[in-house]
Image (cartoon, rainbow, N blue to C red):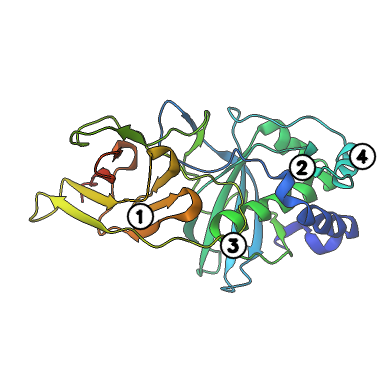
Amino acid sequence: MDNFLESSDDKLLQSLLIKASQEGDGILSDQIGSAPVSATHKVVVPKPGFCLKFKDDTKGEKIFINVCQADNLPQPDNISDEELLKILDSDDPSGFRVPMSIGEPHAEVDKGGKGCTAYDIVVHPNFLTRIQNSEVMLGFFITICIEGLEAKYNITLNRKWTILKNKKFIGSLPEQNIRTQSKPLIQDLSGESPLGRSPLISEVSDTKQPPVVKGPPPPYTIIQEPPEGHPDFLVAEMHLPKVKSAATLTLDVGEDRILLETRSNIYHLDIYLPYDILQEECAAQFNNKTKILTLTMPVLVS
């Protein structure tokens, strides 16, 4: 046996999963995600807790969730199983929220030597103890983990899960960076060259949103400096003539990806870069006169 508890073992957990799934949008904490370290973020160092095994219904591959702990995360209110069930059965299921940090997916190998994907979800140690001692809280927690992963990474997990008996985690447990303050805005300029200013990049919200019609991509150019060989940095210029101010822009810069969205979906740009960049050192600025958003991205040394 590879497990000490399976989702199919208890009808109570099954009914709780169904109920919480129906109300998941109102329960899931908005304090999830990863972002570059700054004054508005803090580093979370995960410690092992236990490991869940799922299957991706779309791709058919194994998915593992490393449930971890870190004492610098907030902890939810200490409520009883009866109080939780009442909240789930009420008209306002948002009465209990679980602060958690959902890390980026990382490729791993299972015990059979086959490729799999692992995700790390971090909670406060006291809450970890709570879910290990309560089947009701465990079922609720697993449900919001599923909801969070599906919303953030556009995957579909089979609702049958297994808790591994002999492994507390799969692969490694990298550090995570979580928001501690409201996200900053892109710097708004009245003129002048935008290069060489302080980095102010807005992080895309991780909360689940309803589907929307995306706007067209704006005209853009990307140049590298120096122009020959491996660049020291990339400079992207996005022409946004219909944008009135930087306050309407949302910019997310990944290791090799740029995602730009605008209020009212005037524009939408989602592109991948030919090089990995240093996310925490990027600078984004919008020129109100020229209507150009300039993004300067230092390139990771190969």
Asked if residue 169 is positioned above or below residue 274 in the image, the reply reads above
The answer to whether one can see residue 284 in this image is no
Give the structural element (helix, strand or loop) at label 2: helix
Which of the 4 quarters of the picture holds residue 86?
top right
Image spot of residue 42 (x, y percent): 48, 29
Check if mark 1's residue and mark 3's residue have beta carbons within 8 Å.
no
Q: What is the C-alpha distance between the residues marked 3 and 4?
A: 31 Å
**Tag 1: amino acid:** Arg
Check if mark 1's residue and mark 2's residue have beta carbons within 8 Å.
no
* Quadrant of the frame with the N terminus: bottom right
Q: Determine which residue is flagged by label 4.
A: 82
Give the structural element (helix, strand or loop) at label 3: strand
Residue at (88% x, 40% y) in the render = 81
Q: Determine which residue is flagged by label 2.
A: 132
Q: Where residue 178 is drawn, which disc sits there? A: none
**Tag 3: amino acid:** Ile
| Sequence-wise first label, 2 or 3 | 3
Image spot of residue 294 (x, y percent): 26, 44
- Badge 2: how crowded within 10 Å, few (<14), some, or many (20+)? few
Q: Determine which residue is flagged by label 3.
A: 63
Q: What is the C-alpha distance between the residues marked 1 and 3?
A: 24 Å
Which of the 4 quarters of the picture holds residue 250?
top left
Nearer the viewer's eye, disc 1 or disc 3?
1
| Sequence-wise first label, 1 or 2 | 2
Q: Is residue 236 left or right of residue 1?
A: left
| Sequence-wise first label, 4 or 1 | 4
Asked if residue 277 is positioned above or below residue 72 in the image, the reply reads below
| Sequence-wise first label, 3 or 4 | 3
**Tag 4: amino acid:** Glu
Q: Is residue 50 left or right of residue 231?
A: right
